[in-house]
Image (cartoon, coloured by chain):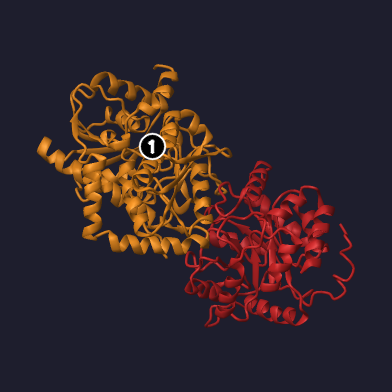
Chain colours: A red, B orange
Amino acid sequence: MAHAPPRGIRAIPPPWVGDYLPASLEVDDTALGRTRLCQFWIERRAVTVAAGRKALVIYLMAGLDTPELAEAAVAGGADLIEIGFPFSDPLADGPVIRRAAERALAQGMRTAACLACLREVRQRAPKTPIVPMTYSSLLEAYGWERFAEETRAAGATSLIVADLPADERPDLRRIQLVAPTSTDERIALAASTTDGWLYLVTVAGTTGARTDLSPALAGLVERARHAAPQLPLYAGFGISTPDHARQAARLADGIVVGSRALEVAEAGPAALGDYVASLRAAI
Amino acid sequence: MSLTYGPYGGRFVPETLIPALDELQAAWESLRDDDAFRRELHELATSYAGRPTPLTLAERFAPGKRLYLKREDLLHTGAHKLNNALGQAVLARRLGKQRIVAETGAGQHGVATATVCARFGLECVVYMGEEDMRRQRPNVERMGLLGAEVRPVDFGTQTLKEATSEAIRDWITNVETTHYLIGSCVGPHPYPEIVRELQAVIGREAREQMLAAAGRLPELAIACVGGGSNAIGLFAGFIDDAQVRLLGVEAAGAASLGAGRPGVLHGARSSLLADADGQILDAHSISAGLDYPGVGPEHAQLRDTGRADYVTATDEEATAAFRRLAETEGIIPALESSHALARALHVEEELVLVCLSGRGDKDLAEVLAAPRS
């Protein structure tokens, strides 16, 4: 699925193309608890900041057509793909992602099928970081370490667990989330343990489109920058339009778009590619 | 943070809620042993809720045994749920929260929450599955009358599981202004502990009353278990009395302890009805209050340590016990409590204490529609 992004968008290739770290990367625990992968992200941010480029993260629910959709999203300018492993009771998600999870489960997208989907996305997007996003219950059932190992073996760059705050299961390497309600202490904890970048939840609420970008984002970015000046900060929740994307990307190093991407993806890869390209152009 | 009850408990919620849980825990820890707080609760319990509730010997229901009923059905609003709702409302006021959200299954917790919100002038939103709204119509109407907004939950099982998820989503969205008044000893820490402590009044009173009425402790204490709040409250009174056997009765189609596996739901690790992939399964029970695929983490620990036993009763057994208590004692029990009554008839022990957690007015339509066995 090749979609020509708007002219000029890909004139300069992203500086990290080819630099995606292989899944076999060993953890290198430093005194900070940082991994080499994390160091990679910090260095990558330095390069992208210098190049003035913001990261665009697109969330897709695991499903039969997800590999094709992921390829279209990457062609449209996505820098990172999140793959939702559906859970029956997704507390952090609003109606769009909840319904997508219900449909995916009805289609048999259980953990094994999600891992197969992940492998296929990895093949179709060999240089794009891919991050499964799910809930604790799936890891509990599969085995926490086994889940982390097998997602990595299937091509995952890291992991997001929406209902696992930084102080639960500290041994599990993952991308940590912080929210406007997080205290400075909790932001510092999340920043010191996160695997690569920090996910800024823009708003107290669940996932899903909103009319306006949350006014809480600016303060959260400021506090997170203070806690971890070098860490890439990607903002998500409630970002759906190019206008939101532009505003959020002025503050953060990247943006995450989920619910609206899922809605657009229902019209197929071409529509998703165009939508992603419109976000890319906006940031 | 660590797991709270052996390998169970914890705080498996989105980060957005963690500061609110920290705040709740700090408030709870400062109030738990605070004399003024205890006095306020005691005053409300006696002058408003109707505590202490009596102990009734059910001679005709269980001939050949001495079976005592702890009459939480006589508490204001008709169930033990008010013990927890009153305590948490006082807590919410201390936290400065003016808006309350809650979930409800049978509607008893929703009614208790709507009641305390009316009493204290708090805004009240109750999430309830559409299936439960259908089968517990009187409670929906009571909540409306008490000034609460009942929000129907029309997806998934349309029962307590989805209502709980929606209440938590509301809380995530409005966490700065809102207290989540959870109805059972489930959810993220410190909720299971708060609910247990607020329901422990059942066991404290029952222990004293048994000593006064029977001259000794019961051989067996029985309660129904959905999320498990009336059971954990009853058990709290006898947990240190090793000679008292503790028995929880689950609905046969919702046996989170009897047929469950370790999993994570609604913020805690516990024993759940879930498949091998960790997807939560549908529970089924004629009793809306037991129709839940999870259970309080402390019950999972009590099961594992062997301190409490857990068995099941079927819809038919519960319905038969419901009718039997009405016909032999002139007491119409809640369908939930009827599960405990059903098992109480078939235990070996002679001196038995049953928690009659609620009254059954709300269940008349359901029972009258069920085939008579």
Along the horizontal axis of the image, is B228 left or right of A222? left
Give the labeled residue for mark 1: B108
From the viewer's side, name the closer residue of B62 and A244. A244
Tell me how many marks there are: 1
Along the horizontal axis of the image, is B201 left or right of B116? left
Q: Position of residue A272 (x, y in %)?
A: 80, 55
Along the horizontal axis of the image, is B275 left or right of B180? right
Disc 1 element: helix
Q: Chain of mark 1?
A: B
Q: Position of residue B156 (x, y in %)?
A: 57, 39
Q: Position of residue B354 (x, y in %)?
A: 25, 35
Q: Quadrant of residue B52?
A: top left
The C terminus of chain B lies in which quarter of the figure? top left
The N terminus of chain B lies in which quarter of the figure? bottom left
From the viewer's side, name the closer residue of A236 and A140. A236
Q: Is residue B118 above or below residue A55?
A: above
Residue B343 in view of the camera: yes
Residue A57 in view of the camera: no
